[in-house]
Image: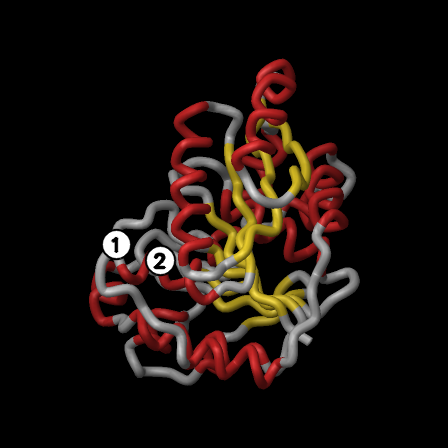
Amino acid sequence: MVEAFAVASGKGGTGKTTTTMALGMALAEEYDVTVIDADTGMANVLFHAGLAAVETTLHDVLAGKATVEEAVYDRFGMTVVPCGTSLSGFKEAEPERLRDVVATLAAETDIILLDSPATLGSRSAVLPIVLADRLIVVVQPTIPSLSDAMKVQEYATTYGTGVAGVLFNRVTDDAAIDDIAPKAERYFEGETLSTVAESETVRAARRAGEPLLAYAPDSPAAEAYRQAAASLSVQARDAGTVADRFRSAVIPDEL
């Protein structure tokens, strides 16, 4: 079985990578989980996973300089494929090759989490959303964040990608959630997975180069992410069929 989720937001600063890694660790308690940093222009997974010093990343694979296996690392109970941060690596990468990367990894895992670019400004940015089976939408309880996230959802569903749910992140005002969450449920497909409060502990985990659930497993934020993971109903799909779909995915010519 395998299901691919794109973790997306529509804007930067929502805590998308923190969410990807936290959900990955929580889900890894029950499933084989692979995290792929598909944000080839603004990669962050390598910093969250303590992989900043590695030599081979997804950039090398997408440039045809390395195999998928050479860019795979076992971290915190997950398989992690980090992406590099250099401008030259980004320029040399061929986004279309991500299809084969995901197809290759699909044979060896239960869940793939694609940490997606914040915006839909290029073909490389939309590809993870087009490839995924379902979308996990990460938003802050503000109108601009919700508006951008709705655009991501609209784009995803246009290409047949479902919506697993919405996670409210970096919440500083409980009253805002009480007001916005019911409205969001009218516009977003999928349920509200969890609400994660703004936390200095989350920032400290990032500075330490560890996922939140490894750095502070008993923190309120960690528990909120576990709740989100428990709310996801993972749908078993045949790995061979999924891999074929990945390899044949059509990349939009226009946004």
Where does the image place residue 159, in percent across and percent down from the top left? 41, 60
Type of amino acid under label 1: Leu
Left/right of residue 42 with respect to residue 106 in the rendered view: left
Does 71 sit above or below residue 8? below
Label 2 CA crowd tier, 10 Å (few <14, some 14–19, many 20+): many
Q: x and y percent of residue 56 in the render? A: 40, 74
Q: Is residue 77 above or below residue 102?
A: above
Q: Give the image location of residue 2, x and y in percent.
A: 64, 73
**Residue beneath disc 2:** 126
Q: Which mark is residue 255?
A: 1
Cα gap from disc 2 to disc 1, whole angstroms:
8 Å
Assign a secondary structure to mark 1.
loop
Which sits in the foreground, 50 or 109?
109
- Residue at image x 46%, y 81%? 68
Indicate which label's residue lies in the foreground, 2 or 1: 1
Give coordinates of residue 199: x percent, y percent.
61, 29
